[in-house]
Image: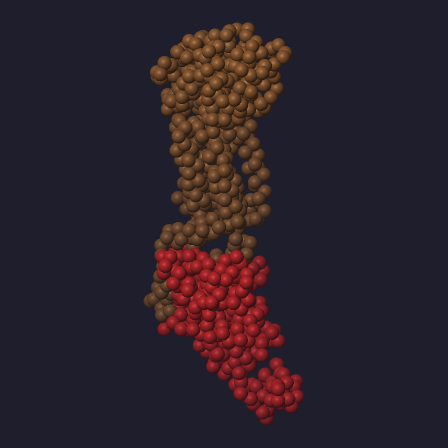
Amino acid sequence: MSAVAVDAPVGAGTGARGSSNGALLALARFEARRLLTRVPVVVAFVAYAAWIVWHTPGSWDGHPALQEADRDTQAMPMLVGLAVLVSANFAALRPVRHGTEQHLGVLAMPAWRRTAAHALSVVPAALLTAVCVGGQFTWEALKPGAVGHGSPAELAAGPLVVLAAGTIGVLVASLVRSPVAAPLLVVPLLYLLVLGSGSGGADGVSWLAPVVVQSGGDALPSGLLGRPAAWHALYLAGIALCAAFLALLRAGGRNVAVRTGVALTLALAVAGGVLQARGAQPSPELTAARERAVSDPALRCTERGRSTYCAFPEWAPRVGVWAGVVDRVQALAGGTARERRLVVGQRIGAADLVSDAAVPPRSEPGRVTVGTAWGGNRVPEFSSAVAAVLVTGSEKAGGELCDGRMVTLMWLSLSWQDDPMDALRRVRLDDSVSGSAIVLSPTEPLSMTEGQTDVVRRLLEKPAGGTGERVKAHWDELTEPGVTTARAAELLGVAGPREADSCE
Amino acid sequence: MTPTVSASGLSLHYGRTRALDDVSLRLTPGVTGLLGPNGAGKTTLLRVLATAVPADRGAFTVLGHDPATSRGRQEVRRRLGYLPQTPGFHPDFTAFEFVDYVAILKELAGRGERHREVRRVLDEVGLRDVRGRRIRKLSGGMRQRVALAAALVGDPGFLVLDEPTVGLDPEQRMRFRELIAGAGEGRTVLLSTHQTEDVAMLCHRVVVMARGAVRFDGTPAELTARAGGRVWSSAGRDPGAKAGWRTGGGSFRNVGDPPAGAELAEPTLEDGYLLVLDGDGDTAEVAA
């Protein structure tokens, strides 16, 4: 066919035209508005927001390590991602579902640019997810007990998951012209989720999952995490963009820009995937640093009152609250224990984000261990460790305690707290206030007999002042090895057990 | 007058079926009617001119742009309004949203300006009061008007309407006739229809197709004139008539070659159409 040069005829359309790119963005806005008002997407975002409001106030007992809290923002965006995947897929298939292909096919905007608009339409959902992630993390960071540093790459994972899910939905629409495909795709995606939580990120394959869950063990200093989060973010971004460009190619956008985009983003995804797999294995330097952190950690020590407090640098802001506990427990003690110089040192049992190894107790006198977690049950646990050192001399001796000193130890640990009986319940493994039980501490647990439990409960039910005077007055006898529980009860003015102490 | 559409030698085959056979025509501003029996190639011609399918052979331009090239096709599409025979709708869109969606796909500029244009065409087709209603809740006639509004949005220079009044009741058809007449003022409209009345009342030109080829191309008066002296009345059906039917007055109206001394009647456009199609189509399908 050949063009025929003619004058502009009467009747030429005079409607105002915009640029093709302007129309593309207008369509992206139009589709984004519709996407954000789809029922699955609305439900997912409402559930996500509700989860943040419900979960965040009590998370980490108000004392988050931000290098751990950032990962907590990654799971819920998966729900949003699934909703966006299905909804974006349905939107891209709209002309097929409603038979408008013939009509829309002769309009100025070609199919591949319409596909581009669908891919762009998921960006606001990703941005809204970023707002939720930012809100949740900021909430954690503003808590008075927050320590540490979040990672931008970890925080980016949630929004990138939503972006990738949306563009994959659009790509699937261009490959399979049926609205059944996207819901079916949810099954392998759930498998990927399992893949991400299976090995806890210890192997490279698990990092192919959108989100890699690592929730075991102690909170670690940022430098020991060793998560290839930045490569994972690159991997997710590569997948999101590659899916979008492949959808454009499939929809007929076969120009140089699209082909180049496919090649570059595919390279990006592959590079991110390979580098994150390599990064999942800790380097020899990281392994050595982790081992040092367990056996001989590099801590920053400060003097507070008569005691010394040594913490990983990121936990330095928490020294004040530890000192507050030590001061309170020590103020209740008698004899030389009131003036004893303690060295409170932070320790971790393992440094690989997976293991949940116990921290062995110290045998050196006056040494108290504190973990990287704080708040909630960790407070009476630490208080018990301080009391154990004051009563027995060392953590190790406290762990081996099997006589009436346990009564004094537990009273020192709990009587200063706002709700001593609740603290007793929480510090015991079985959450009870009667019978024998394991008492948790930052290192090896202590144990209470039934008789000791009864005496401690009776003491905690009484006003603390009178008992405090008795503790100080009879300190030497109360902390004498071999003192019976019955004698301790008698000295403290409450009924004691009839049976002799018996530890198992 | 410079033609809006200029086509020469358009041919298209679907397998062994010849859908278009060397079609040439020139369309100028105003409404041009396209008549023909089912299978005549009307819809195929409209789809070719609307750039929905390419012709096997031949060439055409729309408003000076050649759709054979990618850029030319884009320019044609920017100036085109197309109402297909069975327009699809997105039922969960409101009327406004659907026309706005089409306006975006026509690359209309700026949100405010585009929304003004969408409101204008919805007002023009009489849907001002229901523009916020979802399409699934609109009647068939209203949906057809939404489709017309979508075709009109952006003030296209060339409007292609494929049987827009099918399925409408007489009142709705009258309303549509009014809309199409308005649309034909200042732009070129190609109207495919089975309704010869529509052509007689709306069109300044008429093209008759049969078996993929153009059988007639002229004014409605010229098509009517084809039946001059070939329509007559008789007491019974004349065996020599190509078509004949009893009228309300009881006499028979015959079209064909009248016998000597026959009582000639005033021909209509439909009579001319029947005679043009003589031997080419199923005349019984032509609406009275």
Q: Is residue A4 visible?
A: no
Say above or below: A36 vs B15: above
Could you say which chain is coloured brown in the image? A
Say above or below: A472 vs A380: above
How far from the left and from the top, in percent, is residue B107? 40, 57
At 42% from the left and 66% from the top, the residue drawn is: B121
Viewer-side residue, A164 vs A329: A329
Colour applied to chain B: red
**Residue at the extreme left:** A7
Total labels: the figure holds 0
Please give left or right for residue B109 compared with residue A69 in the image. Answer: left
For the C terminus of chain A, the image quarter is top right
Viewer-side residue, A457 vs A392: A457
Say above or below: B270 vs A454: below
Q: Is residue A340 visible?
A: yes
How far from the left and from the top, in percent, is residue A352? 48, 21
For the N terminus of chain A, the image quarter is bottom left
At 41% from the left and 29% from the top, the residue drawn is: A146
| Quarter-of-image position of residue B74 | bottom left
At 38% from the left and 22% from the top, the residue drawn is: A320
At 53% from the left and 15% from the top, the residue drawn is: A493
How far from the left and from the top, in percent, is residue B183? 43, 71
How far from the left and from the top, in percent, is residue A365? 44, 8
